[in-house]
Image (cartoon, rainbow, N blue to C red):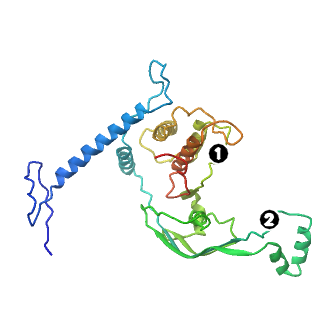
């Protein structure tokens, strides 16, 4: 097998003809072409949004609210660099799962108290097995599952309905209260799940249902979340209110809900945001948490590309 050597050439380097046995790869030229293509695609995407934005008021003299033209990747890279220079530390946390078995209640479980509940409870004082019978049978939702998610990586969980994908994500975020038992070993960067309760904000679960306070506006919802998660170690001479305003404007611009900032969230009974807007608000609120581990359970269902 022939060995090829990668070299860095200038843009004026001759391109090798086809059929040569040892082609030279122009890395710098390819990098410049990639950056030019990226800029071109960003401009086309921005122009497409401007031409197909049906929510804009045509009769207005000018746009009342303009979305800031920013490059998301460069913004996060610059923010991370400035935070590191200010003494901050990056969040890196992996998850290791070994022999995970989760048991839940069967369909015959009685979860509603009735007139016979005190009798079963009284009988369980003398015969504990009678109380177990009243609670129905149990079954394994997950059985002997092993998984590993490296820090900075994304783990995709796929399965048919009823396979236990949501249960798996809930257990990763350390939400175990709704299950009969959770056996196995789950560690977060070497920290056991029992000790991880002290770091609840570092592992969150975003459900498929959009659960919010329906009478609060988008601004009030995100402002409350930002108040709870405003870091103490900020940039020099940056106040808390300035930090919250900057992050709020960035997030609503990213997810296209600038005009809905003062609209109430609503729900099935109170009119407010549409289904897609409420779904985007759920994703935005989860991003505000800045958690080390985020479990997304079909969070983009119903949204277009």
Q: Is residue 48 above or below residue 130?
A: above
Q: Residues within 10 Å of mark 1 (few under 14, many from 20)?
A: some
Position of residue 182 measured from the top left corner of the image (x, y, whole percent)? 64, 73
Asked if residue 61 lies left or right of residue 120, the reply is left
Residue at disc 2, secondary structure: loop
Instruction: Using the image as rendered, state which of residue 258 and residue 80 is in the foreground.
Output: 258
User: Are the two marked residues, 2 and 1, in contact with CB atoms closer than 8 angstroms?
Assistant: no
Asked if residue 123 lies left or right of residue 27, the reply is right
Q: Is residue 77 above or below residue 111?
A: above
Q: How many marks?
A: 2
Q: Residue at x 61, y 69 (%)?
A: 194
Q: Residue at x 45, y 41 (%)?
A: 254
State the residue lying farthest toward the front. 19
Instruction: Examine the image and state in which quarter residue 217 appears.
Output: top right
Q: Residues within 10 Å of mark 2 (few under 14, many from 20)?
A: few
Instruction: Using the image as rendered, state which of residue 171 and residue 23 is in the foreground.
Output: 23
Q: What's the distance in space between the residues labelled 2 and 1, CA to CA? A: 26 Å
Q: Residue at x 74, y 69 (%)?
A: 107
Residue topped by disc 2: 111
Q: Which mark is residue 212?
A: 1
Q: Is residue 98 above or below residue 292?
A: below
Instruction: Using the image as rendered, state which of residue 280 and residue 8 is in the foreground.
Output: 280
Instruction: Using the image as rendered, state which of residue 274 and residue 69 is in the foreground.
Output: 274
Position of residue 278 measured from the top left corner of the image (x, y, whole percent)? 59, 43
Position of residue 187 measured from the top left corner of the image (x, y, whole percent)? 53, 71
The mark lying in front, picked from 2 and 1, is 2
Asked if residue 299 lies left or right of residue 305, the reply is right
Residue at disc 1, secondary structure: loop
> Which mark is first along the chain, 1 or 2?
2
Position of residue 172 measured from the top left corner of the image (x, y, whole percent)? 56, 65
């Amino acid at each position: 097998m022939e060995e090829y050597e990668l070299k860095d050439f200038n843009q004026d380097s001759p391109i090798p003809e086809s059929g040569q046995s040892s082609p030279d790869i122009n890395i710098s030229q390819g990098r410049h072409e990639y950056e030019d293509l990226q800029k071109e695609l960003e401009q086309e995407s921005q122009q497409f949004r401007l031409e197909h934005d049906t929510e804009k008021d045509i009769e207005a003299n000018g746009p009342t609210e303009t979305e800031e033209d920013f490059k998301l990747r460069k913004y996060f890279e610059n923010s991370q660099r400035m935070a590191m220079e200010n003494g901050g530390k990056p969040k890196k946390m992996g998850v290791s799962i070994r022999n995970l078995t989760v048991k839940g209640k069967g369909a015959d479980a009685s979860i509603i108290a009735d007139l016979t509940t005190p009798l079963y409870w009284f009988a369980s004082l003398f015969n504990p097995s009678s109380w177990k019978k009243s609670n129905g049978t149990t079954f394994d939702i997950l059985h002997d599952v092993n998984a590993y998610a490296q820090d900075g990586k994304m783990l995709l969980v796929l399965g048919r309905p009823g396979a236990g994908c949501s249960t798996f994500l809930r257990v990763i975020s350390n939400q175990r209260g709704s299950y009969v038992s959770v056996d196995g070993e789950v560690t977060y960067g070497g920290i056991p799940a029992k000790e991880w309760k002290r770091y609840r904000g570092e592992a969150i679960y975003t459900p498929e249902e959009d659960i919010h306070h329906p009478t609060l506006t988008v601004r009030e919802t995100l402002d409350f979340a930002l108040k709870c998660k405003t870091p103490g170690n900020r940039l020099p001479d940056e106040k808390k209110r300035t930090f919250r305003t900057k992050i709020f404007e960035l997030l609503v611009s990213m997810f296209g809900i600038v005009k809905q900032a003062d609209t109430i969230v609503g729900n099935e009974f109170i009119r407010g945001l549409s289904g897609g807007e409420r779904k985007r608000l759920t994703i935005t609120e989860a991003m505000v948490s800045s958690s080390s581990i985020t479990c997304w359970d079909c969070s983009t269902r119903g949204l277009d590309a």
